[in-house]
Image (spheres, rainbow, N blue to C red):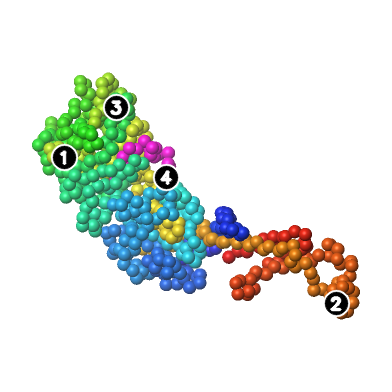
């Protein structure tokens, strides 16, 4: 890895006052460039590359190589690595990323907009901050990945909030996040299906609302490779296989749509040939009409009552139904109801489904295409005070068996373009995940992590096949960033009182050779012949001279007032 050094320097000032002196703090932002044209490391003693040691300040002189890790394999041969990759992964997960059970971030140098979860695979690039600077300047990092297949070439940039953004995505193809009430993708669950014995009782919602979603029975849910790409069928991320349990969503009032509200449910579903529970001819996907909540004093309790009113009701018919393996989307008041039913879904494979209300239209899209619709205007109240469930209705009678992934709920109707993009999970620029964020930059530590469930990034920065097989920049990468270095400018006020230093040792002021004070030449007693100050010495407590300040121009010493001279120096 060769580094080239630039000299692009700018300054940001911060002033602090303390007594008679002022300290100014500023940062010099130096630009560094790196590339893969050379395998040499030729700065100071930076030989013997070791990624793990670069994570710790006491070993900061070591460069970090580019390393690809995943939670399940630890089986690639790393010719330049003598560490256990699993140990590095744990270090990243616990020192830099959120331990998701705590719902907090550990790197406090990042902005609150930072998305702080480490997904299943990562390419890790570590910059030697202690040698080249104190940290990465926010918004300055960029890296270009080159591949012989142009589709896998991309540019990643730092968005100033700690997120690494792929510039190849067209952000106009993302549904505005402010409309998203819930976003569940199960990608953080790789810990539980790869190497965590005890499953957590909840899943994460990465919508702006951060809803709390609990699992009724963790023994009846497992995690597997997620939705496929729509062009190569390669799995991406993690999905949840549900075997007779359900999820409960707190803040269920947020999903209590009234008859004038538009909304949309977008999700991926893999339907098995049979359901484990077929007491009834259907199994719920989303339900909000079964368990009513009742406030008694300060407590909220479940009553177990059933409502004839529901803002939405989405279920899958099973093999016992007259029309098996179909999606049914319903809405109802006490006296009127609406229902639209899809055609039969293919079993044993993934289907993207959207159920939405937009105006008076109720629509079901399957794999990007409008499959069924109806038109109805509801005139009565449809909302209720019931709990919201995913893959069930709060009971054990109609729970789902099947796999779910990338569940999103919007409080708006989706356009036909929105539907197309949500279904598009192509390996090059799929929009199913609705994000251009592919990793993170940790500014203070100089750690860059490309962590994204899409296969496009599985060999990021690692050459053509992920085995460091670079060919100049045909299968390599280059990039740049600005590092930060702190300088302290000190100001010391030297006070010279009017009765001090009002003399000279120049013998020419005397009129005789005996240097008698009484025989001072009268022409040098004028104020214009006062001493001039050209040099000031700074001394420590032991009266050792530690610094000399030179004035740009001689300064006349006045004997009628006290004088203050400010000496500034950098350390």
Q: Are marks 1 and 4 in contact (CB under 8 Å)?
A: no
* Foreground: disc 3 or disc 2: 2
Q: Are marks 1 and 2 in contact (CB under 8 Å)?
A: no
Picture layout, residue 565 above or below residue 506: above
Label located before the other in sequence (1 or 2): 1
Q: Which quarter of the figure is the C terminus placed in?
A: bottom right
Task: State the CA–CA distance, disc 3 to disc 4.
Answer: 35 Å
Task: State the CA–CA distance, disc 3 to disc 2.
Answer: 106 Å
* Foreground: disc 3 or disc 1: 3
* Foreground: disc 3 or disc 4: 3
* Residue linked to disc 3: 258
Label located before the other in sequence (3 or 4): 4
* Residue linked to disc 4: 169
* Residue linked to disc 1: 399
Q: Secondary structure at mark 3?
A: loop
Query: Where does residue 181 sit, x and y in percent of width and height?
Result: 33, 37
Tell me: 144 left or right of 305. right
Query: Where does residue 258 sit, x and y in percent of width and height?
Result: 29, 27
Q: Are marks 3 and 2 in contact (CB under 8 Å)?
A: no
Start-end of magenta stretch: 168-185
Q: Secondary structure at mark 4?
A: loop
* Residue linked to disc 2: 515
Picture layout, residue 26 above or below residue 549: above
């Amino acid at each position: 890895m060769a580094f080239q050094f630039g000299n692009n320097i700018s300054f940001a000032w911060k002033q602090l006052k303390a007594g008679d002196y002022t300290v100014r703090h500023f940062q010099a932002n130096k630009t560094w460039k790196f590339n893969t044209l050379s395998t040499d490391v030729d700065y100071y003693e930076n030989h013997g590359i070791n990624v793990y040691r670069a994570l710790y300040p006491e070993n900061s002189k070591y460069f970090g190589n580019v390393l690809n890790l995943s939670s399940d394999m630890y089986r690639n041969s790393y010719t330049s690595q003598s560490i256990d990759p699993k140990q590095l992964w744990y270090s990243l997960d616990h020192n830099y990323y959120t331990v998701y059970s705590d719902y907090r971030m550990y790197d406090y140098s990042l902005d609150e907009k930072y998305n702080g979860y480490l997904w299943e695979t990562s390419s890790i690039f570590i910059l030697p901050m202690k040698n080249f600077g104190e940290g990465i300047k926010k918004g300055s990092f960029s890296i270009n990945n080159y591949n012989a297949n142009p589709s896998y070439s991309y540019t990643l940039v730092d968005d100033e909030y700690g997120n690494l953004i792929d510039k190849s995505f067209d952000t106009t193809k993302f549904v505005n996040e402010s409309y998203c009430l819930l976003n569940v993708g199960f990608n953080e669950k790789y810990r539980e299906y790869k190497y965590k014995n005890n499953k957590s009782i909840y899943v994460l919602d990465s919508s702006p609302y951060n809803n709390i979603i609990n699992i009724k029975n963790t023994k009846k849910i497992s995690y597997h490779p997620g939705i496929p790409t729509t062009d190569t069928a390669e799995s991406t991320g993690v999905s949840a296989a549900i075997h007779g349990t359900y999820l409960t969503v707190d803040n269920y009032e947020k999903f209590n749509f009234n008859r004038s509200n538009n909304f949309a449910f977008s999700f991926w579903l893999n339907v098995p040939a049979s359901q484990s529970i077929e007491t009834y001819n259907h199994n719920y996907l989303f339900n909000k009409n079964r368990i009513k909540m009742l406030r008694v004093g300060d407590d909220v309790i479940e009553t177990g009552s059933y409502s004839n009113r529901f803002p939405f009701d989405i279920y899958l018919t099973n093999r016992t139904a007259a029309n098996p393996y179909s999606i049914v989307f319903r809405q109802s008041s006490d006296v009127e109801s609406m229902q639209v039913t899809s055609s039969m879904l293919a079993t044993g494979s993934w289907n993207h489904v959207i159920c939405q209300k937009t105006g008076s239209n109720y629509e079901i899209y399957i794999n990007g295409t409008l499959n069924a619709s109806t038109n109805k205007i509801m005139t009565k109240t449809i909302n209720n005070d019931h709990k919201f469930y995913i893959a069930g209705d709060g009971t054990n009678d109609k729970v789902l068996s099947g796999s779910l992934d990338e569940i999103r709920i919007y409080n708006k109707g989706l356009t036909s373009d929105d539907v197309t993009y949500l279904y598009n999970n192509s390996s090059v620029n799929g929009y199913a995940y609705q994000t251009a964020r592919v990793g993170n930059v940790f500014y203070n530590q100089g750690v860059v992590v490309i962590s994204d469930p899409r296969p496009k990034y599985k060999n990021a920065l690692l050459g053509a096949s992920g085995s460091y097989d670079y060919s100049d920049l045909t299968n390599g990468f280059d990039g740049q960033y600005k590092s930060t270095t702190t300088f302290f400018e000190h100001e010391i006020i030297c006070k010279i009182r009017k009765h001090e230093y009002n003399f000279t040792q120049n013998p020419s002021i005397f009129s005789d050779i005996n240097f008698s004070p009484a025989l001072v030449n009268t022409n040098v007693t004028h104020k214009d012949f006062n001493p001039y100050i050209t040099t000031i010495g700074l001394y420590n407590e032991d009266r050792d001279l530690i610094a000399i300040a030179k004035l740009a121009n001689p300064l006349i010493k006045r004997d009628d007032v006290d004088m203050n001279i400010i000496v500034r120096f950098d350390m």
